[in-house]
Image (cartoon, rainbow, N blue to C red):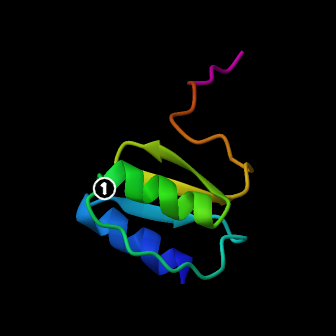
């Protein structure tokens, strides 16, 4: 399960993960001698996924679909 693979990588860095509801599928990988970033990129590429990191949270999306992630600008009332 690709979600489990990403969760395991996130655990290594003590990061939280939020998945888009369309993130699904299987992946098989044997990664040795690669950095954490290389491993994450490889898993994401295998599943045709994208990722945005905001602090300690990783948001994972199917394809290139991404929400507006991050701090929201302050709004003022008129």
Percent position of residue 4, x then y: 45, 80
* Residue 69 vertical placement versus 16 (above, below): above
Instruction: Give the main secondary structure, helix, strand or loop, of the magenta stretch.
Output: loop
Among all residues in the image, which is located at the extreme top? 78
Taking 44 as reference, is 30 left or right?
left
Position of residue 17 in the picture relative to residue 12 (left or right): right
At label 1, counting other C-alpha atoms closer than 10 Å, the crowd grade (few under 14, some 14-19, many 20 or more) is few
Residue 53 horizontal/vertical position (percent): 46, 45
Q: Is residue 50 above or below residue 9?
A: above
**Quadrant assignment for the C terminus:** top right
Judge whether 68 appears above or below 34 on screen. Answer: above
- Comparing 60 with 35, the one in front is 35
Residue drawn 65% across and 80% down?
Answer: 25
Q: Nearer the viewer, residue 58 or 71?
A: 58
Q: 44 or 71: which is nearer to us?
A: 44
Task: Decide whether residue 16 is among the magenta residues.
Answer: no
Q: How many tags in the picture?
A: 1
Q: In this view, does 46 lie to the left or right of 42?
A: right
Residue at image position (68%, 60%) is: 48
Q: Specify start and end residues of the magenta stretch as a single range.
A: 74-78
User: Which of the image's four quarters has the N terminus?
Assistant: bottom right
Q: Is mark 1 on a helix, strand or loop?
A: loop
Q: Does the magenta stretch include residue 76?
A: yes
Q: Position of residue 54 (x, y in %)?
A: 44, 42
Rendered residue at 41%/72% (across/down):
7
Image-based side of 15 in relation to 77, left or right:
left
Q: Give the residue at mark 1.
A: 34
Q: Residue 62: x percent and y percent?
A: 70, 61
Residue at point 56% right, 60% down? 44
């Amino acid at each position: 399960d690709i979600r489990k693979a990403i969760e395991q990588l996130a655990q290594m860095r003590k990061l939280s993960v939020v998945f888009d509801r369309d993130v699904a599928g299987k992946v098989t990988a044997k990664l040795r001698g690669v950095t954490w970033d290389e491993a994450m990129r490889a898993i994401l590429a295998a599943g045709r996924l994208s990722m945005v990191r905001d602090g300690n949270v990783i948001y994972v999306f199917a394809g290139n679909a991404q929400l507006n992630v991050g701090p929201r600008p302050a709004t003022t009332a008129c």
